[in-house]
Image (cartoon, rainbow, N blue to C red):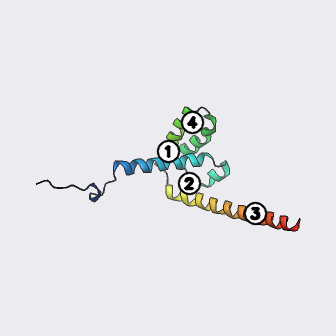
Amino acid sequence: MVDSYDDSLDGEKSKTQVKRELHALVDLGERLTTLKADVLAKLPLTDALRKALAEAPKHTANIARKRHILFIGKLMRDQDQEAILVLLDQLDASTRQYNERFHNLERWRDRLI
C-alpha cells in the first residue's frame, strides 16, 4: 500500500512559491528604481539598498542593468516590504487623484472654449 504525501500540509512553502515571492521582490525593486530621490527618502530602506538604487541609472547595458536589478531584489529580502508597498500605494492613489483632477479641468476648459 502506498501512502500519499501532501506537501501543502507540512507548512513549508513550495519551491515554486518561493520563486514567485523572490520574483515579486525583484519587480518591486525595479519599480523602486523609477522613483525620484525625494520619494525614495520617504521609504524605510537600508543604506545598502539606497546606494544600489542610486547606482541603478548608471547601468545602461542591458545585461548589467538586469544583473543590478537582481542585486536590488536580493537586497529587498531584508526590507519591510509591507511598509514599502503601503507607501507606494498611497503614492499611486495621490497620483491618480491628481490625474483625475487634471482631466476634469481639461473637460471644463474644453466646455468653455
The residue wearing badge 2 is 44
Identify the disc placed on residue 103: 3
The residue wearing badge 1 is 73
Tag 4 secondary structure: helix
Q: Are marks 1 and 4 in contact (CB under 8 Å)?
A: no
Q: In the rendered view, does 91 fall on the left or right side of 18?
A: right
Q: Residues within 10 Å of mark 4 (few under 14, many from 20)?
A: some
Tag 2 secondary structure: loop
Splitting the image into 4 quarters, where does residue 58 fall?
A: top right
Q: How far is the residue under mark 1 from the one under mark 4?
A: 12 Å
Mark 1 vs mark 4, foreground winner is 4
Identify which amino acid the numbered label 1 is placed on.
Answer: Gly
Q: Are marks 1 and 3 in contact (CB under 8 Å)?
A: no
The residue wearing badge 4 is 65
The residue nearer to you, when weighing 27 against 32, is 27
Identify which amino acid the numbered label 3 is placed on.
Answer: His
Q: Residue 83, percent across and down? A: 53, 59
Identify which amino acid the numbered label 2 is placed on.
Answer: Pro
Q: How far is the residue under mark 3 from the one under mark 4?
A: 35 Å
Q: Residues within 10 Å of mark 1 (few under 14, many from 20)?
A: many
Identify which amino acid the numbered label 4 is placed on.
Answer: Arg
**Residue at point 44%, 47% (across, down):** 22
Mark 1 vs mark 3, foreground winner is 3
Tag 3 secondary structure: helix
**Residue at point 62%, 55% (across, down):** 42
Q: Residues within 10 Å of mark 2 (few under 14, many from 20)?
A: some
**Residue placed furthest toward the right:** 113
**Residue at point 50%, 58% (across, down):** 82
Q: Are marks 2 and 3 in contact (CB under 8 Å)?
A: no
